[in-house]
Image (cartoon, helix red, strand yellow):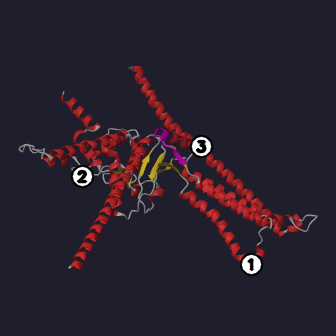
Amino acid sequence: MPQTIEGFIKKYGLDNINEPLHLVGAEKIEFYNDLEKIFKKVCKIFDKLASISSLRGALLMMGLAKLAGTDSIVNKTDIKNALNIDRLEKLMHAFEYLEKKNYISIKEKTPKFHVVRLNKEDNPDLALFQEIVKRYWSSPKERKNKIKRWEETE
Amino acid sequence: MKSRQIESTEEDYYNQEESQNLIRKVRSEYISNLLTCIISITLLILINIIYFMFLWNASTHPKLLFQTSNTNKSIFDVIFLNLSLNWLFFSMSTYFIMYLLRIAFFKFTDSFIKYLENELEKLDLKLQKRHISEKAFFVMNSFAILILGLIDLKIINFDLISNSQFFEFLLIFYLAICIIIPIIFHFFFNNLRVKLKKNYHINFKINYPILKRKRYPMIDIYLSSNYLKLKSNKTKLFLYKKISEDSWLIKSKTYLDDSMRKKNPFLSFKAYSTQDDFQHEFLNIAEAIKEWDKWEDYERVLRRRLELEIARNRYRILVFSTCLENRYRCN
């Protein structure tokens, strides 16, 4: 069963335009089941995000998912910048809460440099979450930059 | 439209206020409980010191201080022989120390328990308060005081018994147990829990900052299921991991509650919540336990089927072998 959307697309060759998609009998059922499992996972992600009681907790998760997965290490300040928040103190509660929830892991390299990671080992559904966020979500900083560029063109 | 918006913001404000009020209330209750206990412990220790100084004085200068006019017996003799009173003093002070430790470790206050009860009532569940250690303490110590009272009244006299040393040792051993067992019970079995089904329940542990002032203080509620199976059982470990991952539960090694981080040979589901998302996490862990039970049932059915199949095959082999035996005999 594909764990991610990319895996799903690859399994059924959805990205191959030259070959038509032919699903017969059991294949069709498998396709439908895989799709349903992905939707179930997405629903679980919605549920978890909605139940985050800390203010800006869900936003922080999205910001981290957007930044994570690249070669560079993500620290707390990177997330603050991506979310376009002026002070790190505004996110401290969310960091603490999400670490206790085991959704993220924080490693203290130096007192001022904390590496933040999504805890995909314990919560595999976060891989799908990261994929969706990376593909379709733009961070406040990106949106701000887009508007800035649009303003400059006028 | 505008009035509706105002209403919703007011509601948010009250929700936030309610949550913050709970923390404030719990914290103040905890501090007042702790202070009361510290004062009572100090008083008790002082009384104990005075009492034992009085005994010591009496033993060093019995005639000077305590000799009575009518009899030759000093008051010291009376008090020293009053074993039951001394034991009552000693055991009561131990009980208060235990009580203080309980408050210091568990941090449950009346208002928080009420909050838990309210939340669980919405889920049609009941909170069970277990006070095994207190019960054990009172039962065992009342029996000890009874025996010591009988010794004081000279109804039991060790001098008249042949193996007196052995019985004295037995009594000392029992008195030690009277203190040790309630303490063990207190740390391992005194807790709040919710019974879901036979063999399945959820325990609670809480933590919150007492003195540290935070902008958004929260009560950490650690939920854990009862011990399910040994970690050495590979298939169960796999199932445990699968369910934990699917439900986004916390695995033992990453559980942030210090007492739980120690190596435990048993598997149990763990979750973390605050006062705002308690219901959600409770349902999450309860569902995980239900899933575990479903697999246990399934395994039980499979095992039963396998046993039946083995029994059937054995029967077939038996029938076949008797047939073969009969044919051999006929030939």
Identify the residue under disc 1. Answer: B162
- Position in image of residue A141 (x %, y %): 28, 38
Mark 1 or mark 3, earlier in chain? 3
Distance of mark 2 from mark 3, alpha carbons? Answer: 50 Å
Q: Within the magenta stretch, is there residue B133?
A: no
Q: Position of residue B200 (x, y in %)?
A: 45, 52
- Which amino acid, by three-letter code, is at mark 1? Ser
The 10 Å Cα crowd at callout 2, few under 14, some 14 to 19, many 20 or more, is: few
Q: Secondary structure at mark 1?
A: loop
Confirm whether circles 2 and 1 share one chain: no
Disc 2/disc 1 C-alpha distance (Å): 83 Å
The residue at which mark 3 appears reads as B29
Q: Helix, strand or loop at disc 3?
A: helix
**Chain under label 2?**
A
Rendered image quadrant of residue A94? top left
Tell which residue pokes out farthest to the front in this image.
B330
**Left or right: where B180 falls relative to B122:** right
Location of the C terminus of chain A by quadrant is top left
- Looking at the image, residue A85 lies above or below residue B62: above
Residue that lies at the very extreme toward the right in this rendered image? B70
- Specify whether residue B124 is painted magenta: yes
Q: Secondary structure at mark 2?
A: loop
Q: CA distance from mark 1 to mark 3?
A: 56 Å
Residue B302 image point, x, y percent: 32, 58
Q: Residue at x 57, y 45 (%)?
A: B109
Determine which residue is flagged by label 2: A71
On screen, residue A108 versus residue B55, left or right, reads left
Q: Is residue B31 among the parts visible in the rendering? A: yes
Report the amino acid beneath label 2: Asp
The magenta segment = B119-128
For the question of whether residue A118 can be seen, the reply is no
Q: Chain under label 3? A: B
